[in-house]
Amino acid sequence: MLIRDILNMKGGTIFSVAPDGKVADAVGLMVKNDVGSLVVMEGGRMTGMVTFREVLKALDAQSGNLADLRIRDVMVADPISGSPDDTLDHLREVMTKNHIRYLPVKDSDKLLGVISFHDVAKSVIKETSFENRLLKRYIKNWPEGEEAPK
């Protein structure tokens, strides 16, 4: 399975904020849309990402006061990104190795979407279920009297 397949299943909705936006407003956007990350866009291109992890770090550093904090103060600039042609195995390795829960997917400079670790897990479950159904059907329809391959 390729990243493009995961994007096709989940859709390409991208939630974004500007780097000069308020972190408090970003939290509201994340809550409203039930997402854990926002793409930071400036001049039509991705310049960073902000996730709940950066928000929590900022919240801790500011003793709970996000009032004056801007996105550019907490975002991850130029985050690691994936390609639509990357495999699911490669994606899992990159996300696990780099401790990333949200990975933007780009084709050259064009942002196609964001893949979450949850999206990866759902895809693995779906792929495994499909393979299991195929194997069960194969076994169920095994010709009588024939020996199984070794």
Image (cartoon, rainbow, N blue to C red):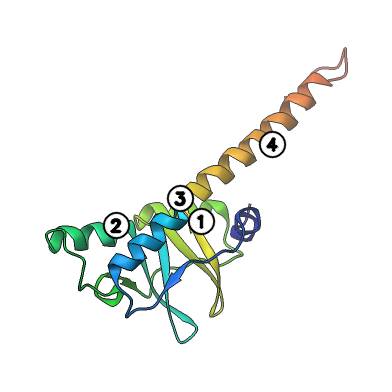
Q: Is residue 94 visible?
A: no
The kind of secondary structure element at disc 4 is helix
Question: Where is mark 2, residue-wise?
Answer: 53
* Residue 131 screen position, x and y as percent: 68, 35
* Residue 45 screen position, x and y as percent: 48, 82
Question: Where is mark 1, residue-wise?
Answer: 90
Question: Where is mark 3, residue-wise?
Answer: 117
Above or below, 26 against 132 in this view is below
The kind of secondary structure element at disc 1 is helix
Give the quarter of the image for residue 145. top right
Foreground: disc 2 or disc 4? 2
Tell me which numbered mark, 2 or 4, is placed earlier along the sequence: 2
Mark 1 residue type: His
Question: Where is mark 4, residue-wise?
Answer: 130
Q: Is residue 11 left or right of residue 45?
A: right
> Few, some or many C-alpha atoms within 10 Å of disc 3 (few <14, some 14-19, many ≥20)?
some
The kind of secondary structure element at disc 3 is helix
